[in-house]
Amino acid sequence: MSFSNLGLSNEIIRAVNELGYTEPTPIQIQAIPAVLSGCDLLAGAQTGTGKTAGFTLPLLHRLSSDKNLKTTSNGYPPIRALILTPTRELAAQVESSVCDYGKYLNLKTMVMFGGVSINPQKRLLKGRVDILVATPGRLLDHVEQGTVNLSQIEILVLDEADRMLDMGFIRDIRRILSLLPKQRQNLLFFATFSEKIKALAAGLLNRPQTIEVARRNITAETVAQKVYKVDRDKKRQLLAHLIRQDNWYQVLVFTRTKYGADRLVKQLGDDRIQALAIHGNKSQPARTHALAKFKNGSLQVLVATDIAARGLDISELPHVVNFDLPNVPEDYVHRIGRTGRAGASGEAVSLVSVDEYHLLADIEKLIQKRLPFEIVAGFGANLPTKPQEIPNGRKENPKPKGRKRPARSNATGSPKTSAKQSARRTVASSLPTQKC
Ligand code: AMP
């Protein structure tokens, strides 16, 4: 199968060829014809599967085929496609992909997210914008100020919709939906299916085509997963030891809390290992700077919390470390999805103290796999140590705080996931959908 068999225009095929894509990925093979046909789509695909091109390429094709564009009061065509993402980083990444794939088309793309000044965004909105990539909070800021007009949207994409719901964006999403024209195409992408996604899809999608590329919650086979049992106080030394001993040059490390991320960066610095943190309390320029350095290879260690790292596309990342295991088992799958991508092999290492054995058991249950463990001499778990309660971290279903708007990149939480809550189903088995 090649891209030219999928019905895309020559300009789009030229752009993907230049990016070195020789053939479409499984999600692209299914999603591209579905979106080109104009039907709604419910698609289960994790990052790393090529899902962004899966919705962007046909979206670009559809928008660029429309030659009779009306102009609006500003003298330009209206915004015709809206892509909503849960995080700023994902929004920036999606916009960059849209620009890459659409480089030979006469379409203008804009990204908007919070944490940066709103004024440059207002200026851009006065010009031509065909495709708007946005996080829900900042988009609503523009709505409130009357600086964006969503009344001519033809295609809506909810990217990583499950994470948007986890982050408490449901009210914002409903509000945005109420501002869109009734007649439009809706594309809903999620990584993990849940009752909440089912409810959202039922209210949003019209006779959607459903596709799902990887079985839910199964971790990529190209990722070697390892667990080191370690004393809770020796994690930092063990991490430094592994980085040095195995010459790790590009490591993404996950911590449970923002404070933990900052503390680890400082401690690694004391060990003369260069690290920066990326989390919700960091300013947007600091986050962008850290990510850019990490991506271009000039930063050895990037320490991140789950929400901040969500959707980061760092190609062929060789090592992911769970410095703390996540409270929500699905986050383990998302975390290690940063490595072993697009066929490249990678290693996911978890440093597990006695306090986290129950979290490890939850993860193993979810991925239906026992993870092999090792103990490194000198760092070994003193098994008689009593487990301590884990105080913080992302939990499932956080309640929005204060204003109705949820905390934007740093959701924290509510009660621990029950087995029932975390039970996931596949799309095909639980959603009564029809083919478009
Ligand atoms: P995504 O799942 O959209 O985050 O994409 C993951 C990575 O796969 C990105 O770095 C894309 O550039 C890359 N990618 C997407 N489609 C293809 C393709 N058909 N062939 C090779 N790489 C691809």
Image: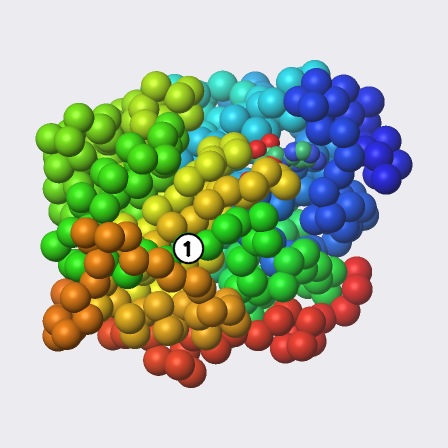
Q: In terms of secondary structure, where does tag 1 sit?
A: strand
Q: Residue at x 62, y 45 (%)?
A: 49
Q: Residue at x 47, y 35 (%)?
A: 317
User: Label 1, on which residue?
Assistant: 226
Asked whether the viewer can see residue 231, the reply is yes
Drawn side of residue 2 relative to residue 71, left or right: right
Ligand 1 is found in which quarter of the picture? top right
Q: Is mark 1 within 8 Å of ligand 1?
A: no
| Relative to 110, residue 52 above or below | below
User: Which residue extends farthest right?
Assistant: 5
User: Which residue extends farthest bottom?
Assistant: 420
| Relative to 139, residue 120 above or below | above
Q: Residue at x 23, y 26 (%)?
A: 274
Among the 4 quarters of the image, the one containing residue 291? top left
Among the 4 quarters of the image, the one containing residue 72? top right
Instruction: Residue 97 in the image: state x and y as whole percent.
Output: 57, 29
Instruction: Residue 287 in the image: state x and y as whole percent.
Output: 29, 31
Q: Residue at x 30, y 47 (%)?
A: 254
State the quadrant of the N terminus: top right
Choose between 349 and 54: the one closer to the eye: 349
Instruction: Residue 19 in the image: state x and y as whole percent.
Output: 66, 22
How many numbered circles are shown? 1
Asked whether the viewer can see residue 189, the reply is no
Choose between 21 and 381: the one closer to the eye: 381
Drawn side of residue 268 relative to residue 423, left or right: left
Residue density around tag 1, few if under 14, some if 14–19, many if 20 or more, within 10 Å: some
Choose between 194 and 37: the one closer to the eye: 194
Choose between 61 and 239: the one closer to the eye: 239
Instruction: Residue 168 in the image: state x and y as whole percent.
Output: 34, 60
Query: What's under tag 1, amino acid-wise?
Result: Lys
| Relative to 220, residue 425 above or below | below
